[in-house]
Structures are given as C-alpha cells and as structure tokens.
Amino acid sequence: MSNEKKRLVWVPFSLALAVIIGIFLGRYYDVISRKTSTLFSGENKVEALLNMIEAEYVDTVSQEKLVEDVMPKIINELDPHSVYIPASDVEGVNEELEGNFSGIGIQFNLMNDTINVVSVISGGPSEKAGLLPGDRIVSVNDSVFVGKELTNEKVLKTLKGTKGTEVVLGVKRNTSKKPLSFKVTRGDIPVNSVDVAYMLSPKTGYIKISKFGRTTYDEFMNALARLRKQGADRYVIDLRSNPGGYMDAVINMVNEFLPKDRLIVYAEGKSFPRNDAYATGTGAFQNNQIVVLTDEWSASSSEIFAGAIQDNDRGLIIGRRTFGKGLVQQQYPFGDGSAVRLTVARYYTPSGRSIQKEYKMGDNEDYSMDLMNRYLHGEFFNQDSIKQNEEMVYTTIGGRKVYGGGGIMPDIFVPRDTAGITSYYNNVINQGLLFQFAFNYADRHRDELSKAKDHKSILPYLNGDMLLNEFVNYAAEKGVKPRPVYINISRNLIVNQLQSYIARNILGDDAFYPLFFRDDVTLRKAQELLDQGKGFPNTEKEK
C-alpha cells in the first residue's frame, strides 16, 4: 500500500481518536472548571482554599499549621500595630496589663546559667516559704534547672502556674553548705505599673509609671495621696519608656488634673463612631503644678496623657518627642484560645491632632526603623534636627502652636545625656558586668547592708572609690582591660549605677530609683521649673 493510501486510512482513525480524547479532556476540564467556580464563588476564599487542600492535595498537610502560618501574614498586610497572638502567648500578653498572675513571687535574673533571686515580693508565696534575695535556684521539682539552655521565657513558664499548685525549689544559699529545699504554693502576684513614688524635694512629688494597666489608676491615686500627705503640692509624672496600655486608665488619670468639660481625648474609625472623653470636674489635683516627662519610647496611652495635658495648657511636657502611636486596638478572641488585636480607630488629642506617625500598609520594616532613623538624624541630641509638619498646625486651648503628624513634641526639649559614656563603659555594660558585680557585692555584704532602711542610709556603706576599684578588678578578671583615662571619664556614671543596683538588691525599687535618677538631667530640669513656679505654660507669650 502506498504512503498516500496509508495516510488516508489513518486520517479518519486519528480524527475519531482526537474526538474521543477531546470528549474526555472536555469532561476533565469541565470538572476542574466547576470546582474552580465553586471555590472562588464563595465569600471566603481562604476557608475554601483550606478545604480544597484538605480534600484534594497530594500529601497530608496540617490544617492547624497552615492557619497559624497564614494568620500573621494576613495581619502583617495591615497597619504596624495590628497583631495575631497564638493561643500559647495570649495569657502572657494579657497578664502584663491585667494586674496580676499566678506564680511564686520573685524577681530574678539569669547569671552564670543560674536563676538568681534579686528580690522576694513582700507577702508573696516565696517569702512565706522562706526564700531570700541572693538565693540561687538550682532545681525545680527535683530536676536540675541550670545550664545554658535556660531562658527568661523558660523560667517564667516553669515557675508560673495555676493558683494553689505546688512547686519544689532546690536552692543554693551562701550561708548554707548544703542545698536547701522549699515547697512553694503558687498564688496571685500583683503586676504593679507604678514603679515608684517619692519626694524629690520638700514640695515636689515624683511618680514613675511603666505602663497603663487595669490597676494603674488605683495605684496612681494611692501614690498621689501618699505624696500629698508627705507635703507635695506639685508633681512630676514620668512616662519615659512607657509603651501605653488601657485607654480607660489614662482617661481617669488625666481627669484628676483637668476642670469640668475639658476634652481629654477622642477616638474615631470607619466602624467606630466618634467617642469623646471629657473631664468630670471631680479631680482632686486640678490646681497643682505638674510636669510630664516623655522620650522616644513613650507611646500610645502615654501620648494621650501628654497630649491632653499639653493641649489643655495644664502642665509642661519635658524631654523628647514621643513614639507616635495613635492607633486603637481591640482584642478579639478565637475559639482555639488565640486572638487578634485589630486596629479599630485612631485617637486624637483635644486640639484635633492625630498622634500616629506615617506608615505604609504592610510595610512594617520601614516603620520599625523610624526610631533608628531619628537617632541617626540627630533628633535625640539636637532640637533643630526635628522637622515639624508645618501643614499640620493646631492650637492649644490657650492659643499655643502644636503640631500633628507624629508623636508629641515636648514644650521643653532635653537631649539624651551622653556624659560619661566611653568605650570602657560600653564594654562593661554590654557584658552585664555592672549588674553582675552589684548582685555579688550585695550578696556578700547582705547582713551589713540590710541595716540600712532607705536609699539615704545605705550610701554610707557604699564608698564610691572603693566600689570603683573593686569593680575595675572584677571587670579585668572577666576580660575587660582597665583603661584609666576612660574609667575616670565614666567614674560618676559607673559609681552611680553600682550604688543604685546594690541598693535595689537590698531594698528594692524604692531605694533604686532615687539613687539611679540622682543625676538625671531631664528630672533636674523638671524640678528646677517647678521650684520656680513655671509648671503652667505661658500662653500669653505665644498668642
């Protein structure tokens, strides 16, 4: 048979085969098409995709892991402060603001791969069981608990627990040759947000607030009452490095200083109708001079506080420009115990300023570099380096100009203090040697130092020259070579911190802060202005 005839015979067969294959493929693709149509016709593509993977994917895949991986990625496409919280982290994230948690009641640090008890919370479970500052915890429930694998997170997870449960701690104590054993029953441990309150001078009270939690307002009022009883009639409110917290707490606190019907703050969002907070006029400190201290780490509720005081011309803001977080988050729980903190509104100061600095949706990297860029630009050291947004000018109730577009600019700028900082100081700080030496020194001299009752009475036991010499030798043993010129430049800074940390290890924060802040330039400026009666802004000069 010729090639031409062969071709003619195969053509009909080929056509028939093509039709059959086409019908088959048509059916196959029709099925895929229908599945695709069904997949993308619903309202929730993510859920549909997960269902398809579960039903059709070639290998077995953990749906739970897929969800946990994808949730943060979705949230990261929003603003920088919306966040997904895995179920394992929710309790720890919440308890910082809730006011208490269940644990054993100690402050500790990890040093030489061992848990060192810095202080024992008064009235807490560990104090009742007999633990003391300076104890080293070396075992938990008869299992060795030391080593390089220890982390703060691992220690916290192990020592915290349900109220009423017991934990057996093996302790090494300098005054005992044998290890000691203590059975501690976990209980409620307060999480204080007012770090300290004390008198700066016979008339000036000082209060440092670390965050705005559920109990902060009550703590704040107790502190104000104690200081007033000691003679204070003017106050310094330190919000430096305060990251914020509950808005209700800060509204109640600002209310204590403002006259009736003054606007404190308002919040508004797409699905969040404008909500204004006004002073009730019941505040007990409406006529007292106040100064608020801020820095680049003061954020959120701290900025509400500073903005309300500034816009109402109620007091002075001293320090450096704040962080610039003006977004309000609402926490929504999921059934598996996880949660999402979703931005639902922006808050505004009384003059109408949005404190939130600029950001791009989904671009958290540039946002997180903002403080570093401000530092490199010189903003922390020179007021002239700060560029105010001249297109966002507002006025306080007294007519002073204030600016929006990112944080609260203080009324009086105080640059970051770099006095005494040298390469030697940075070396001993970076290696944690100041803290380690202070802990060991306090432990070796605990009996003698415990005779002191406050920060003033402990200083005679802590001779600066002797401390410095002993510390330099200690640092040399740890590999930091003495450099006399730099040591002399850093002398006051090193001695001040050594005395402060030793005092904290013996007497707690009530002794630590008054010593640590002795030479604080921002605090000194605040006290100076209050002593001169300048705690109220001069609005006439700027009108």
Image: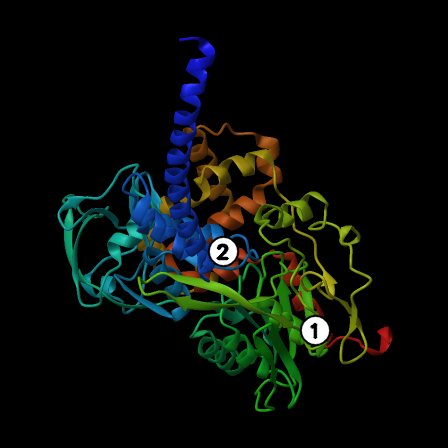
Q: Residue at x 61, y 86 (%)?
A: 279
Which type of secondary structure does the marked residue at label 1 adopt? helix
Q: Quadrant of residue 328?
A: bottom right
C-alpha distance separating marks 2 and 1: 34 Å
Who is closer to the viewer here, 533 or 351?
351
Specify the quadrant that holds the C terminus.
bottom right
Q: Is residue 462 visible?
A: no
Q: Is residue 298 left or right of residue 65?
A: right
Amino acid type indicated by mark 2:
Ile
Which type of secondary structure does the marked residue at label 2 adopt? helix
Residue of label 1:
310
Q: Is residue 426 above or below residue 262?
A: above
Q: Residues within 10 Å of mark 2 (few under 14, many from 20)?
A: some
Amino acid type indicated by mark 1:
Gln
Who is closer to the viewer here, 65 or 145?
65
Mark 2 or mark 1, whichever is nearer to me:
2
Q: Is residue 444 above or below residue 460?
A: above
